[in-house]
Image: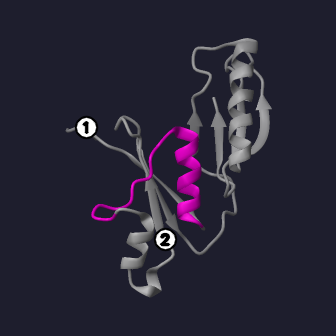
Amino acid sequence: MPSIKQVQITFDCAEPERVARFWSEVLGYVAPPPEGFVTWDDFDRATPPEHQGAAYASCADPSGVGPRLFFQRVPEGKIVKNRVHLDVRVGTGLVGEERLAALEAECARLVPLGAVRGRLLLADDENESCLLMQDIEGNEFCLD
């Protein structure tokens, strides 16, 4: 059986461009416009009026290693906890106070972008510390 070569992670959201910009900043991704367009505004102007207003956006790892993120507008808001979430791995290999400092530094960078700080889960016998957060539309993610 052949293996899967690429994975795209899709977010349902109210404001695709805004959420794409947020995650681009979080992950160091780029948000290029669709092929054949210089900007997202050019793309938007080229679509029929009833579809203008960026019904979707995307961002991608400039190195091509990480998965592409796709954001699509949906009419309903977020109601319950995510069944899938992203772990932003800023503390890999770190333990104790050094790990906590890395998590707090990244949290301090993300909050001005619109992220919301959640609960800090301290290390126990099985897991290292992580920090629960939400993106600008309330989707949960972890600083890990």
Q: Quadrant of the N terminus?
A: top left
Residue at x 53% of width, y 62% of height: 17
Q: Which element is circle 1 on? A: loop
Residue at image mark 2: 54
Q: Nearer the viewer, residue 74 or 59?
A: 59
- Is the residue marked by circle 1 packed among few (<14), some (14-19), or many (20+) residues within 10 Å? few
- Is the residue marked by circle 2 packed among few (<14), some (14-19), or many (20+) residues within 10 Å? some
Is residue 127 toward the left or the right of residue 72 in the image?
A: right
Residue at image mark 1: 3
Is residue 92 toward the left or the right of residue 46 in the image?
A: right
Instruction: Identify whether 4 is placed above or below 10.
Output: above
**Colour mapping:** one colour
Residue at x 58% of width, y 60% of height: 18
Instruction: Identify whether 71 is placed above or below 129.
Output: below
User: Quarter-wise, where is residue 92 in the image?
Assistant: top right
Please state which amino acid type lies under the numbered disc 1: Ser
Q: Position of residue 137 (x, y in %)?
A: 67, 58
Q: Earlier in the sequence, mark 2 or mark 1?
A: 1
In this picture, which residue range is highlighted in magenta?
A: 15-37
Q: Which element is circle 2 on? A: loop
Q: Position of residue 84 (x, y in %)?
A: 56, 47
Residue at x 71% of width, y 23% of height: 129
Is residue 16 toward the left or the right of residue 129 in the image?
A: left
| Residue 22 covered by magenta stretch | yes
Q: Position of residue 55 (x, y in %)?
A: 48, 71
| Residue 23 covered by magenta stretch | yes
For the residues marked 2 and 1, what is the alpha-carbon distance in whole angstroms?
33 Å
Please state which amino acid type lies under the numbered disc 2: Ala
Q: Position of residue 101 (x, y in %)?
A: 74, 20
Instruction: Identify whether 99 is placed above or below 88.
Output: above
Label placed on residue 93: none
